[in-house]
Image (cartoon, helix red, strand yellow):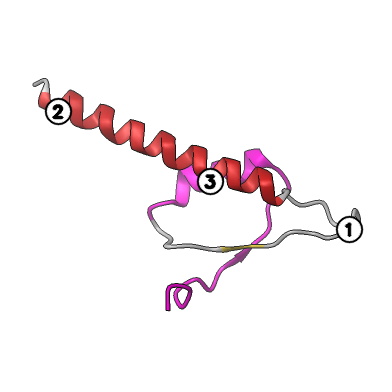
Amino acid sequence: MWGEDMNEQMLFTNRLRFREWLINNHINYNGIWLIFAKSEILKTLQPDKALQEALCSVELKDKSSANFENARNDR
């Protein structure tokens, strides 16, 4: 099953912390479980913001890879 190697549960308090984690760790993980708070007692990243951040990081990674390939082909 696809989630069997997803044993890490992670909590991020804001988009910036999640973005930094994605930049530094996207290659090392197949996936993680994000923890979201249901109340105001614990401040966590909101699910919709986490999705936006994850999708944007994939888009940036794809653009970065394309730029790298174009630069390599221009040599």
- The percent position of residue 66, horizontal first and vertical second, equals 26, 32
Looking at the picture, which amino acid does disc 1 mark? Answer: Ser
Q: Is residue 40 left or right of residue 74?
A: right
How far apart, in angstroms, are the residues tagged by discs 3 and 1? 23 Å
| 11 shown above or below 18 | below
Q: Which residue is mark 2?
A: 72
Q: Which residue is mark 3?
A: 54
| 46 shown above or below 35 | above
How far apart, in angstroms, are the residues tagged by discs 2 and 1? 49 Å
Looking at the picture, which amino acid does disc 3 mark? Answer: Ala
Looking at the picture, which amino acid does disc 2 mark? Answer: Arg
Q: Residue furthest left?
A: 75
- Residue 39: which disc? 1
Q: Which residues are magenta?
A: 1-27
Front residue (pair 24, 62): 62
Q: Is residue 40 left or right of residue 11?
A: right
